[in-house]
Amino acid sequence: MKDRIITNSEKETRELGARLWRENKKHLGKRAVVFALEGELGTGKTQITKGIAGAMGVKNDVTSPTFTLEAEYDLGKLIHIDAWRIEDPKELLEIGFERRIKEKKIIVVEWADKVRDILPNYIDDRSCKLVWVRINYGKGENERIIEIE
């Protein structure tokens, strides 16, 4: 089932991220949750991540970990992966993705389309909830069309 939402500001996009967390909080400690974010540069992937982190109570400033590939917030409460520089989807495994699924972590993957082919190999409905979020530019300067699956 797809949900289609339009946001018109960074604040609204962050609020959508917070809503996504609230809707999936029930899985905390029971199974991993992967928020797979897809969209062009500047569409709001990091804003969604900031909204999720804020709703989780993460106090750290959330920035996209482009050069380090991943960041952990609040002692591993939230794992933030930026797949922009990943050339081979198997690199996701090298940074411990599979282990974090088994540990029932909350994971946000920006540029998830770069690892789309490998995600289904490590995600099943019992061990992990996958929330796929596609963000596109809208007509207005700040308008974003967001599809959630």
Image (cartoon, rainbow, N blue to C red):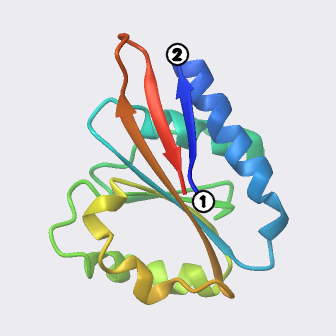
Which labelled disc corresponds to residue 9?
2
Up-down: is 6 above or below 49? Answer: above
Name the residue rendered at 27%, 39% in the picture: 40
Q: Give the number of the mark in front: 2 or 1.
A: 1
Asked if residue 32 lies left or right of residue 94, the reply is right
Whole-percent x, y for residue 65 in the image: 38, 49
The quarter of the image holding the N terminus is bottom right
Quadrant for residue 96, please give it: bottom left
> Where does residue 102 sit, x and y in percent of width and height?
62, 87
Quadrant of res 109:
bottom left
In the image, farthest residue toward the front? 1
Q: Amino acid at mark 2?
A: Ser
Q: Secondary structure at mark 1?
A: loop
Q: Position of residue 82 (x, y in %)?
A: 36, 55
Left or right of residue 112, residue 35 in this image: right
Which residue is at a point 33% across and 53% down the rendered structure image?
111
Looking at the image, which residue sits at the far right?
A: 26
The image shows residue 53 at horizontal and vertical percentages of 65, 44
The answer to whether residue 59 is seen in the rendering is no
Q: Amino acid at mark 1?
A: Met
Q: Is residue 139 above or below residue 107?
A: above
Q: Secondary structure at mark 2?
A: loop
State the residue in front, 90 or 17.
17
Q: CA distance from mark 2 to mark 1?
A: 25 Å
Residue 1 image label: 1
Q: Residue at x 54, y 23 (%)?
A: 7
Residue 91, placed above or below residue 112: below
